Amino acid sequence: MPIFERFKMLSEKLKSARFYTPPKYFAIFLITVFLGLFLIWWAIISCLRQQFEIDFFDIGQGDSMLINIPYNQQILIDGGPDSKVLNSLGEKMPFYDRTIELIILTHPHSDHINGLIDVLSRYKVEKILLPKIENKPAEKDTESLDEFMNLAKKKSIPVFFADQGQEIIVNEEIKGEILWPLKNFQSDNLNDFSVILKLDYKNFCAYFTGDAEAVIQQQILSAENLSECQLLKVPHHGSKTALEEDFLKKINSKMAVISVGKNSYGHPAQETLEKLESQKIKYFRTDQDGTIRIGSDGINFWRK
């Protein structure tokens, strides 16, 4: 049979042929499966690629720091003065991760605690660590502490009180130690209760100091575990009495971060900046540099 006639017969058969069109729901099913597999793959890759990072959030005049630990674990230290911290967390944490493994409240001043109340309302929090304040100083910010503690109780979040020498074991590579306060410490100044945390990741170390100023630093100068550390979070937004020179010399930091916003207190004070400069410590400010991200591989560290 000539090729032309074969082609003609094939064309006629195609005209009368019935083609199978899958139901609409089947196509939707396939798309859903594909998207699901893609999201699982993306989540796994994100987990594997995640590095140890510290974000010092730009949330105005206050403190809030997120420690990102490989395999999607987070430690949040303080929450700033308001709900701005939620935007910062939304930008830095994966959308599928709504769990914060540990919240550390350094002390209950409003510029540290208020945002944490919003965080407790929106995120699953596994543990809380804060200083024990039995005889509250006559400061209005203790009202926020009552609200914070009541919400933690309502959500059945385990609460632990910081004590000098206490260890925080995240994993084999990441460990923290509480250098201050003493569990039964008493003071009329809430700043003096500030939790001082030393966090080690392999050979990298960082100090988180809340608002613990020079008077508190003097009390831990003789501690054996007060060692050199590459990174320092400058206490109390860089106030005039934020740093004890002997403390600064002993920890021998290479980089410092000042969490500060627009304020009427003169933060950071020129005296404090000069102390950092005299020790050749490179410093960054959230009011000028925005959110500051520090990364480390456990040996080296850098600003991202």
Image: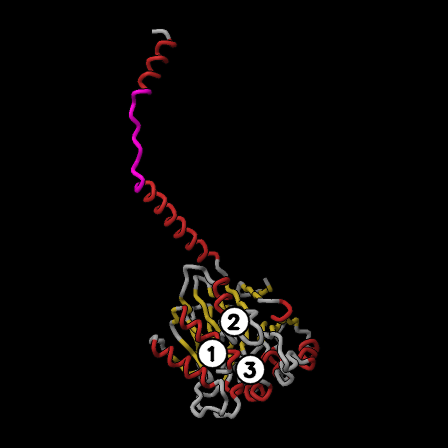
Which label is found at residue 65? Answer: 2
Q: Is residue 239 magenta?
A: no
User: Is 124 on the left-hand or right-hand side of 265?
Assistant: left
Q: Colour scheme used in the picture?
A: secondary structure
Quarter of the image where the N terminus is located? top left
Asked if residue 179 shows in the view, the reply is no
How far apart are the alpha carbons under marks 1 and 2? 11 Å
Q: Is residue 31 above or below residue 70?
A: above
Vertical comparison of 193 with 74: above or below: below
Secondary element type, mark 1:
loop
If the image is split into quadrants, where does the C terminus sit? bottom right
Q: Is residue 137 above or below residue 258?
A: below
The kind of residue on which mark 3 rests is Asp
Q: Residue at the location (52% across, 73% down)?
A: 64
Up-down relation of residue 141 to residue 198 (above or below): below
Task: Report the side of 14 relative to 222 (left or right).
Answer: left
Element at badge 2? strand
Q: Residue at x 40, y 51 (%)?
A: 39
On the image, the x and y values in percent for residue 295 come to 55, 64
Q: Earlier in the sequence, mark 2 or mark 3?
A: 2
Q: CA distance from mark 2 to mark 3?
A: 14 Å
On residue 105, which mark appears?
1
Instruction: Identify residue for label 3.
Output: 211
Q: In x, y percent, where is residue 125?
A: 39, 71
Give the label on residue 158, or none.
none
How far apart are the two marked residues, 1 and 3, measured between alpha carbons?
A: 11 Å
Amino acid on which the number 2 mark rests in the picture: Met
Quarter of the image holding residue 260? bottom right
The residue carrying pointer 3 sits among few (fewer than 14), some (14 to 19) or many (20 or more) residues within 10 Å by Cα, namely many
Q: Position of residue 68 (x, y in %)?
A: 48, 66
Q: Which residues are magenta?
A: 15-26
Residue furthest top in the image:
1
